[in-house]
Image (spheres, rainbow, N blue to C red):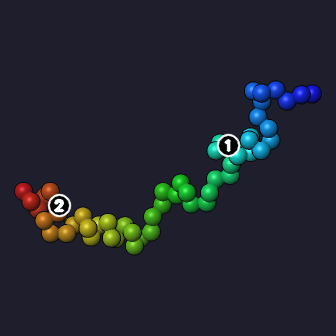
Amino acid sequence: MANSQNELNKGEVQSTKLNQFPVPGENDTEFSAEEAAEAFEQQSAPGRSAQQEQ
């Protein structure tokens, strides 16, 4: 059976983005307690929050 022009070969199929294994941690939405504390400290710094400016 001849391979026609509009068919992909095995290498092309395996290299498509949807056919690859996910990278561990790439879509990780969790964050550490340290990161949360840093974000909270930055948000509650004097003159930074909207409540303190009013």
The residue type indicated by label 1 comes to: Thr
Q: Please tell me whether mark 1 sits on a helix, a strand or a loop.
A: loop
Q: Which mark is residue 26?
A: none
Residue at 80% of width from left, 41% of height from top? Answer: 10
Q: Quadrant of residue 51?
A: bottom left
Residue that carries the numbered disc 2 in the rendered image: 49
Q: 23 and 15: which one is in front? A: 15
Crowding around mark 2 (Cα neighbors within 10 Å: few <14, some 14 to 19, many 20+) is few
Q: Look at the picture and state if 19 lies above or below 1.
A: below
Residue at 62% of width from left, 57% of height from top? Answer: 23
Q: Look at the picture and state if 15 lies above or below 49.
A: above
Closer to the observer: label 1 or label 2? 1
Residue that carries the numbered disc 1 in the rendered image: 16
**x then y, percent, for residue 13:** 74, 40
User: In the shown orientation, is residue 46 left or right of residue 8?
Assistant: left
Q: Please tell me whether mark 2 sits on a helix, a strand or a loop.
A: loop
User: In the shown orientation, is residue 39 left or right of residue 6?
Assistant: left
Crowding around mark 1 (Cα neighbors within 10 Å: few <14, some 14 to 19, many 20+) is few
User: Outermost residue toward the right?
Assistant: 1
Q: 23 and 51: which one is in front? A: 23
Q: 26 and 4: which one is in front? A: 4
Mark 1–mark 2 Cα distance, whole angstroms, equals: 46 Å
Q: 29 and 23: which one is in front? A: 23
User: In the shown orientation, is residue 24 left or right of residue 14?
Assistant: left
Q: Quadrant of residue 37?
A: bottom left
